Image (tube, rainbow, N blue to C red):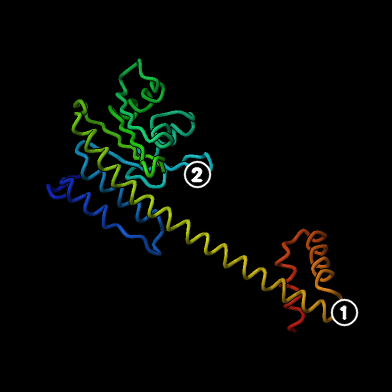
Amino acid sequence: MASTSASDRDPMHAFAELALITVDASPPEQTLRRVAELAKQTLAGAEDVSLTVVEDGQPRSMVFTGRLAIDLDERQYDLGFGPCLDAAKTGQTLVLDTTDDHSPYREFGRIAARAGVRYTVSLGLPIAQRSIGGLNVYCTDDTPLSAAFVEHAEVFAGYAAVAVNNVASYAGAVNEAAGLRTAMASRAVIEQAKGILMGRDHCTAEEAFDLLRRISSHRNLKLRDIAQAVVAEAQK
């Protein structure tokens, strides 16, 4: 494990940086990767960290600090069951001792143990009475996890949830705006094509639109593409 300075281990330092994380035009993964890196730096004993989100019922690891985390995340996704999935969905904190044969996660625990992991701490990211994902911490040290470690991780997850939610909200707004611009552009070119057909064929707006729709269906092409072709031909 890479060495970490005392200031990096200071939880207040991490919380302050989380609070100052801003969203911009950078890829969401770039911002969220810093959240995962901060968790690894400040949670003494964390070997690797990842962030799980569930979109349309499908889990995925948005970011991770190393292969150990992504490999074990994906094993849980393949199994369809595991602490990181349950924490992401419920917002709970789930601690797994991979040597515990009585754990409900014992199958995954054996897989994690073979990878050298002794403990996993999966923390929900709660926002407004719902969980927006999970923070997954993988520890390879045999030293028993203290209550203070888990409490520290939960406080970190609370701050991280705000940062993750802000990033997700911004990305959603950008995608929605892009979709709206595309829709407006499509409508504009369709209206332009209708006008060309009305002038050429001396038909009504409804008849022009019906012609575009029939050509689109016959050629198995998007209505917008047909409209663009009509406009391009008229401009020759």
Q: Determine whether, in the image, residue 46 is placed left or right of residue 135.
A: left
What residue appears at the point 33 percent right and 51 percent down from the top-left corner? 163
Q: Determine whether, in the image, residue 230 is placed left or right of residue 3.
A: right
Could you say whether the residue bearing mark 2 is in a helix, strand or loop? strand
What residue appears at the point 19 percent right and 27 percent down from the top-left corner? 143
From where the camera sits, is residue 72 visible? no
Q: Amino acid at mark 2?
A: Glu
Q: Which residue is mark 1?
A: 202
> Label 1 vs label 2: CA separation?
49 Å
Q: Earlier in the sequence, mark 1 or mark 2?
A: 2
Task: Name, please, the residue furthest toward the right.
Answer: 202
Residue 182 horizontal/vertical position (percent): 60, 66
What residue appears at the point 26 percent right and 31 percent down from the top-left corner? 140
Q: Determine whether, in the image, residue 150 is placed left or right of residue 68.
A: left
- Label 1 crowd bin: few (<14), some (14–19), many (20+), radius 10 Å: few
Residue 28 horizontal/vertical position (percent): 40, 56
